[in-house]
Image: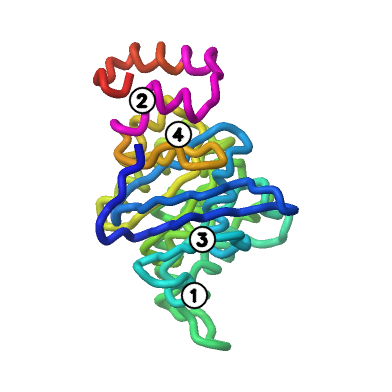
Amino acid sequence: MIQQVENPILEVHDLTVSYDSKPVLWNVDLTIPEGALVGIMGPNGAGKSTLIKAIMGLLPLSSGYVKLFEQPLDTIRQRISYVPQKESVDWDFPTTVLDVVMMGRYGKLGLFKRPSKHDKEVALQCIEQVGMSDYIHRQISQLSGGQQQRAFLARALAQEADLYFMDEPFAGVDAATERAVISLLREMSTAGKTIIVVHHDLQSAQHYFDWVVLLNMHLVASGPTKDALTESLLEKTYGGKLTLLSEIGEQMRKTNLPKDIR
């Protein structure tokens, strides 16, 4: 089940990515609607992080092309923001929360220009949005995992982008942080922002996202959550991991979900 949309904010056409001549993603062809809160899901090694890195030009394509806002990436790069996996960040780097969030303003500055009073006001507002106002001068190495993730989300907000890519933003965070982050992402989506999230928890996905992409080295499904999160498509995606699927099915029944996504 692959649903294409008219006037997509993101178009991926016949995308293939290879490492050492071995394909890790092949023939991915999808479109994403503007203003959607999107979950990219699949088993470990399915190519979820590879997909968003390829879309952003961080990895070379073996074939295919990507368009964002109906344009090539290089022409609209400032309209895109990226929150990487926590494991890819050097948390021992000596910098404060405010410094990290101010980095999100650099794309708005001209060459050799210093941040203005307005830039700092935007950064402080974004820090407040993620509930980190009490930690603006704290070194990021002294923060908890959830606080670190909030700081990097604030940096993404400070970019004032239109399209956000987030690589497992809920990994290793506490329940309160997860609730706060998903609430903020919903607000952003309601305001017309498009957020694409690599996610691993199927039980929460049905509540978090209005559009889901199922991936296992190739595209299995892309469409509204109620149409994509079906038992048959999950089986195709997760390749016969019957214990996992049984547990998910049981949890879905407990939450009294509509029949079409049980």
Do residues under tags 1 and 4 come within 8 Å of each other at their CB atoms?
no
State how far apart marks 3 and 1 are (Cα).
16 Å
The disc at residue 74 is 1
Whether the magenta-drawn stretch holds residue 50 is answered as no
Q: Amino acid at mark 3?
A: Gly
Residue beneath disc 2: 230
Q: Please state which of the two labelled residues, at mark 1 or mark 4, is closer to the viewer.
A: 1
At 32% from the left edge and 35% from the top edge, which residue is drawn? 225
* Sequence-wise first label, 2 or 1: 1
Mark 2 or 3: in front is 3
Q: Which of pointers 4 and 2 indicates the residue nearer the eye?
A: 2
* Real-space Cα separation, disc 2 to disc 1, in angstroms: 37 Å
- Can you give x and y, in whole percent of width and height, for residue 173 in the image? 54, 36
Say how the picture is coloured: rainbow
Task: Name the amino acid type tagged 1.
Answer: Asp
The Cα–Cα distance between marks 4 and 3, rounded to whole angstroms, is 40 Å
146 in relation to 244, above or below: below
Disc 3 element: strand
Residue 36 vs residue 85: left or right?
Answer: left
**Residue 109 or residue 46, whichever sits in front:** 46
Q: Residue at x 32, y 16 (%)?
A: 255
Q: Which residues are magenta?
A: 226-247
On the rendered structure, is 206 left or right of 260? right
Give whichever of discs 4 and 3 has the lower sequence position.
3
Crowding around mark 3 (Cα neighbors within 10 Å: few <14, some 14 to 19, many 20+) is some
In front here: 258 or 214?
A: 214
Residue to which mark 4 is pinned:
176
Decide which of tag 1 and tag 4 comes sooner along the chain. 1
